Each structure stands twice: as structure tokens, then as C-alpha cells.
Image (tube, rainbow, N blue to C red):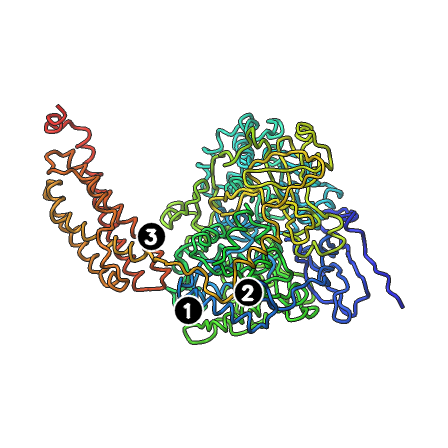
Amino acid sequence: MSFEPRRSRDSIEDIWGPRTPYKHEWPTRVDKNLIEEPEKWVQSACVLCSNGCGLDIGVKAGKVVGVRGRATDRVNKGRLGPKGLNGWTAMSSTDRLTQPLIRTNGELQKASWDEAMNAIVAKAQAIRKELTAHGIAFYTSGQLFLEEYYALALVGKAGLNTLHMDGNTRLCTATAAASMRESFGSDGQPGSYTDIDYTDCILMVGHNMAATQTVLWSRVLDRLAGPDPPKLIVIDSRTSASARRATLHLAPKIGTNMAILNGIQHLLFENGWINETFIDKHVVGLNELRSTVKSYDPHRVEEITGIPAVQIVEAAEIIGTTKSLLSTALQGVYQSHQATASACQINNINLLRGLIGKPGSGIFQMNGQPTAQNNREAGCDGEYPGFRNYNNPSHMAELADLWDIERHKLPHWNQPTHIENLLKYIAAGSIEMFWISGTNPLVSLPNLPRVRELLTKPSLFVVCQDIFMTESAAIADVVLPAAQWGEKTGCFTNVDRTVHISHKAVEPPGEAKPDLEIFVDFARRMDFRDKGGNPILPSADPKVVFEAWKKVSEFRPCDYSGLTYEKLTGGSGIQWPCNDAHPNGKERLYDDGIFFTDIEYCESFGHDLETGVPYTKEQYRALNPAGRAILKAAEYTPSPELPDQEYPLRLSTGRSVYHFHTRTKTGRSKTLQEKCPEPWIGISAEDAEAVNVRDGDEVVVRSRRGAIQLKASVGNVSKGETFIPFHFGYWDATDGRSRAANELTTEYWDPVSKQPLFKSGAVRIERCTGTHIIQAEETQSDTVAKVAKSKLNATEVGDNSPRERHLEQWLGATFQALRLLEKMYEKLVPKLIHDPEANSGLRVMRRITAEAINTMEPYVRKYNAESLKGKSSFRAVHDAVFPSTETTTAYESLVALKGLYTCLADIEAHFIALIPASQALWDAGFHGAMAGVKKDVERMQAWAKHQLHVRSPQTLLVPSKDLWDDLS
């Protein structure tokens, strides 16, 4: 009997499906798409957006034949979006990677797993010997499972003991994590998706939910269609599908989010729309915020943003008087100017109203990818496992003990290296191995011309672990075929902290392996062991790894200790924290008004939002949040690249509802690709008329970085703004034209989250004439040919040019400065500062300096820095700040004290660099010595500072006879 393929609805044309109006309880609707009748159903969840919809995979004869939504799941109640219903068909694509590849004589050729892994290990060992482990970097994804991220974190942090780990979550969700650390003390979404069911008002900032989380938008649409619908405020420069349903749509100029959010807060204060009782008990930072937003009246905000003042007032009144408020943000905030500062203002608004931790009131600092939350939890990018604070020694000691590794070997001398710095180190030649897993940086990173140049350096050894031959895999030295969703078992966590299990449904094709097995195999071949001699990754069984992760997460905000594979199987996903106190998960955080800001518990001590400088523990202690949320303030500043006569339009990039990331999967789904086969540029009718462009015309778009050619889509964009989807690269391009949006984007990054500002920069549009085609600066075939020509084989050591390590030079200069300081105290300073108290103090300073020299001397010898005398900057500083003759007045003594303080500051700067460098050497004795001497220098600085403080009023205010004689 033949089976007629059946689908519950046409999700390509009817993206959100039929309405099921409701309030309080979202009705069930099961969506499905089958090409054959399954023999069995296997529990999973969708990985093609960040919503995390529960689904079942239909399997027949060892093949995936369809999917259906899980009616029991709390996230989607059976619904699936167009990508969820259609993206799985890419699994049957014939161009899957099925066997390892090694670049030999310039070409990628088939190899065995042993050959591929041995080549990687040989290169890693050679680089570690020549450059240390800091010559190796990892760049991962938002697509792997929790267990795989945790394994990778162990490889990098416990095995290689390096900070060089980041992921493409840096591009989509780093600001979400940063803003929650700043405001609430830790990562972790406060709200629950069920808040949509109860809320009276939804505030969406830079978030086109209709395209990015279609099932969640269906939930909103059903509330809007039901009784007592919520009001919807959308802040977006485009007239998106979300904006068209808004009660109020505010369309600011790209890059001005900070001004509009400050303006709303200004009106909340001015009209008394703040919850003073809640603020008094549960919030700090009120006065600074009030002072900062005081000048952002509606007329000033209109001048900056272009939003009419009357709309700003209307928005503030809705927000200020609503009984409940659900706020959301995504890339329109995170990838725009002042990203973290703006995201924090969204948090502020809910805090000022006291609307957090209650049904209908919460905040979604949204994720852009389905497993981005797990990447952050496990510590594979800019975080540490379990949301631990790298500036808190007890957190690092606890993690080292959990992993049973030496405490000084756990890398925590800095925040993990974000991708922009990884690229800088590749450019400088200090990183020579770059391991990419599950992502495609040759399309997704900003300023692609520079990225291509760096990732194709002959000396850079690139490993790419993926499921298809992406643009990035094509230039790799070793390509590892990975199993994908449905071909392996693991867990992942969505935006509202719901943990799902995805069971293996089918075997991966050919020799493809789960990412977990690949990382465990690398760790085994590298012989990474703990203090007891046991492998740091003893098993590739995901259940075993999950159990190990639970111990690391226990007692932290993301507590998984109450979860098991068995508990996650059969019903719905479960929210963390899940533990003894919350055995079925906790729906909302902060319902008790207690935040994760205790100084010994918090994930971060925060940052200056404008400069990005991290605050110290002492500064955080002075703020004293102690379980209270933190209101963070910042002024609006203009974007770093503004439109001008040459480039008059602002550029924004973003998503299409039919594609995900760089289309590695969705571009191979026939239905999705046919609906959205190529990129376009959105432009306003006024701007189109100015350059004589009509809808559908071919245009060239130019920025200061490059040019691309694509069709114009006129309308739904504000005047002066443009929009290009970022999904399209070159793996399936046929005509060689330049079309990747990131050929145009800037290299500016948010100072706190280090997220690139894709929604920043300026472009111009030119109408194409005739058959003119803008060729890519370097086509994919050009890039691959260049790599083939420049690289001989995967095991050859890269750049053999002479290298010089600068530790010895810096250490020698520091030691020489201390010796000169000792002579200063002995001979020079007594001639300049005349009184018994000062001279008594100087004797103490001389003793401290001698002790510091004795502490340093063994390590100066150990690192062969004794011969590097005379290279210190200290001599030049000394000669510049000290008078050449003996002082005769109190004023000149004050000048001499200032000179001493300046010289000590020069020495302190030496130690500011030596402290993290000594940690990065994994030399506990050296680090302890440098930390001790730095404290000695700080003691001397404190003495000089005190002397300046005590002497200055009398010396500067009361006329001195000797001084007046000198002046006459």
C-alpha cells in the first residue's frame, strides 16, 4: 500500500499556522511533516532556532522520514515552524562529509580516522613545543550538545590549560550573557515562555520574533487573537512582520537604541512610574541611573533617534502603567552600537517597575542559536563552567578541584580569548592551529576579506569538524566528518532554561562520528590526565559525561543536579535549576527578589559599560549589591561609522525566516531553499527613488570594506536604513558574484560583550546596468586554489622564521628597574625630600625594595633574564621626572615625591603584565613571586601617595619665601 506524503500545514506559505486564541493556557496543536509512515518515533527537539521546540523524529528502515511536534512539551505544545518542519530533509543530502580528509600536496584527500587524528595530534604537539599551548585555539558553535561543549571545555581548559576558546555564540548571544551578568550577577534568563500567557504588555527591542522564533511568535499571535490581548511595543528600524502587529512601533535610526531606552527611563522617573518599594529592597544604582537619564527628554531623543517625541511619550506611558511586562531583545540590540549598555537598559526598565520574577513579567535576553546557552554554561567561549567567576579565586579553586587538576594550571589570568583577539594572534603568528567545530567563519565573521586572508595563511593549521563541505572546511588542513542532530544523543537548553534530550534516531553516514567522540579521542591521544593519572575524559558515553557535568553545575545558578536522562525522556523538557529544592525545575528566577549578585557567588564583578573596563572585586564590594539587582547606566554615543556623502545609508544585517546561520543545513532543504534562494537588500522607497532603483532591480552595495551585488527589495525599511540577510556565502554560488553580507560589515566590537557590530557601518547603493556582475574579491574557488598552492601537507610545521619570546626582555627590564629604585632610595631621594619622617620612611622603602629584588632573583635566573640590563624604560622615566639638583624648598620636595610616585607607577605597569603572563606559564612559584613583589610596589606607591596627600595643602596654599625668591 503506497503512502501519500502528508503534512499538517504548508509552513512555507503559512509560516505561523492557524490561530488558537487563548489566555492563560496555550492550546495544543500538533504539526507534522512525513514523507513515509514511520516505523518508530524518537524523542528530540528542534535545533534550527533558539526556541527549542520539542519534536519526535520519525524513522523507517534506518532513515529519517519525518517529524512531528511533541504535544506534551511546555515550549511548543506540538507546534513547529518552517525550519523545524522542513530542515530535517537536509539529512538525506548526498554531499554529507562521510570520511576524514587530510590536505596532502595541497589537496584534500581521503584518509582514515587514525591518519587524521594523528596528523592533528602531531601538529598540536609540535606547536605546543615551539609556541606553548597558547599557539592552539578552538572556535566552536551554537549547534553542539551540552555534553560535547563540556568535553571541549575539558580539552581546552583542563588539557591544554589555555584561554584560547570561543564560539560563534560570540556573534549572536554574547551580549545576552553579558547584560545578565551586569544586571543580575549571573547568566540565566529570568523569565519563562509561559509569561506570554499572562502578560499585559510585551516590549520587543531589536527582535523580529516573527522571523527568528516562529513558534514563539505563534504563541504571541494567539494571545493577541484571544481575550484581553496584551499591548505590543516593537522597537525596530524595519517594518517587520512583528512590527506590523504592534500596538506601537518605534523605528529608530540604526545604532541609537541607547538613546531611546534612556528616554523611556527618563519618563518613568519624571512621571513617578517606578516601584520605589521594590527598588529600596532589591536594587542598587538608582541615583546614578536617574542622573544619567535626566537629560534624555523626548525632544532630545527625537533628535538622536528620529522617533517622534509623541511616540516616545506614548511608549513610556504604556510601559509605566502596565500591570505586567515581558521584555525581549535580540540582534537588533546585540549586534548594534552600545550593545551591552543597551541590553542593560532593558533590564533596568523591568527592575524600575518591579516587574520581574512574576507570571507575565520577565525578560528574555534572547539567544540566536539553539544550544548557545549550553556553550555558555559549559565554558567553551567567554565563560567558565557553571557560570563561575574567573576573578574569584575560590571559584577557580573549586573548579580545579572538581576536575582534579593543579589549581595554578586552570587558565584564569584573563577572560577567555574572544574571536577578534584570536584573529589578531593569528595575524601576529602566535596562533598556528585553529580548530573549528560546527560553524563557518568564512561566511559568518565580519569583514570577510580580512578573515579570508588570515584563515588561509600558509602557516596556520586549520582543523574543521562539520557535517558538510562548508566554505571554511574547504580551506582546512584536516576535515573531520561529524554526526549531526538525530545521529547522536545529548541534551540542550533553550532560552527559558528548558533542557531537552535528543535521542539518537539513526546512524551517521559513512565514518562520521559524534563531536563528543572526536573530542574524547583527541584528549586520549594527547594523554590529558588529572592529578591522579586518570584521563580527563574517561568516556565518550554522553550519559556518563552528563553525570560529570551535573557535579560541576551543582550549587551554581545553572544547577542540573536533579536531572537525569530518564527524567528528561518521555514527557516535556524541564527548566533548570532542577535540584532537591526544585525537583521539577524552577519556572522563573528572582521570584523572591534575591539575585545572584552576592560577591562570593556572582559570575562577574561587572564592567564600565562605556569603556568595557572590568571592575575589581574592591569596586564591586563598594557597590555592595549583596543579592540585589544592579541598575547600570551609560550615556548615548554615536556609532563609530556614520553615514556621509560617500556612504549615505546605514547597514543592518539579519535573518530570513527560512534559513539558519550560513545555510549549511537549511540551504540543502529543497523547500526552504526554493522559497529563499538568494539574498536581497531592503531599502526604503525614498532611498530607492534617489538612486533610480525599483523593486527587484539588481544593485551594487558598497562599503569601505567591499562590494556585493544582489536584488533590491523596496519598502518596509525606514529612510536612510538598509537590511541584508547574512546567511548567504559561496558554497552553492554559480556565477562568482559577490553576495555575502559580511563583505561589507565593520570590525567594530562591543567593549563589554565583544560581540561584533554587524548592525553598524555605512553603505551606498548603485543601480546595475546591463549584465554587469560584481565579482567576489576572492571567489570560493580562488580561495581553495590559493590554499592548495600555498600548503604542502598537514603535518609540516608552519612558519619557521626566527622567533623571539619577550618574557625574558620584560622580566629583565623589571628587575633592572627595581635595582635602580634601590639606588634611588639610597642616594638620590634623600637629597630631594628633607625631613626625618620622610627619611625614616625611605629606609623602609629601601628594605622593601631589597626584599623584592631577592624574591625576583631566582626567577630572573630561571628564565635567563639576567643579561637583559639597560633595556628598562625606568631610566628614561627617572630622568624625566626628577630634578637634576638637590631640592631647597617644600614645593621641590613635593615635585620629587610626584616623581617617585611616577617611577613606582612605571614599575607597577611591569607587574601588571607579568602577573597574567606568569599564570599563563603554569608556574605557580613564579606567579606567587610576581604577585608578592607587586604588592611590595603597591605598598611603596601607597607611601608616596600618602606623602603627597599630607604635604600638598600647606605646600600649595601657603606662600613659601624660598619659592617666591626662586620665582623672582
Residue 913 marker: 3
**Residue lying at 69% horizontally and 67% vertically, measured from the top left:** 570
**Residue lying at 56% horizontally and 53% vertically, measured from the top left:** 169
- The image shows residue 893 at horizontal and vertical percentages of 15, 37
What amino acid type is highlighted by mark number 1? Ile
Label 2, secondary structure: give it: loop
Answer few, some or many: residues within 10 Å of disc 3's Cα (few below 14, many 20 plus, some between 14 and 19).
Answer: few
- The earlier-in-sequence mark between 3 and 2 is 2
Q: Residue furthest bottom?
A: 533
User: In this rendering, would 821 be left or right of 396?
Assistant: left
| Residue nearest the viewer, comparing 759 with 360 | 759
| Residue nearest the viewer, comparing 177 with 901 | 901
Q: CA distance from mark 3 to mark 2?
A: 42 Å
**Residue lying at 47% horizontally and 37% vertically, measured from the top left:** 634
Marks 2, 1: nearer the viewer: 2
| Residue nearest the viewer, comparing 496 with 849 | 849
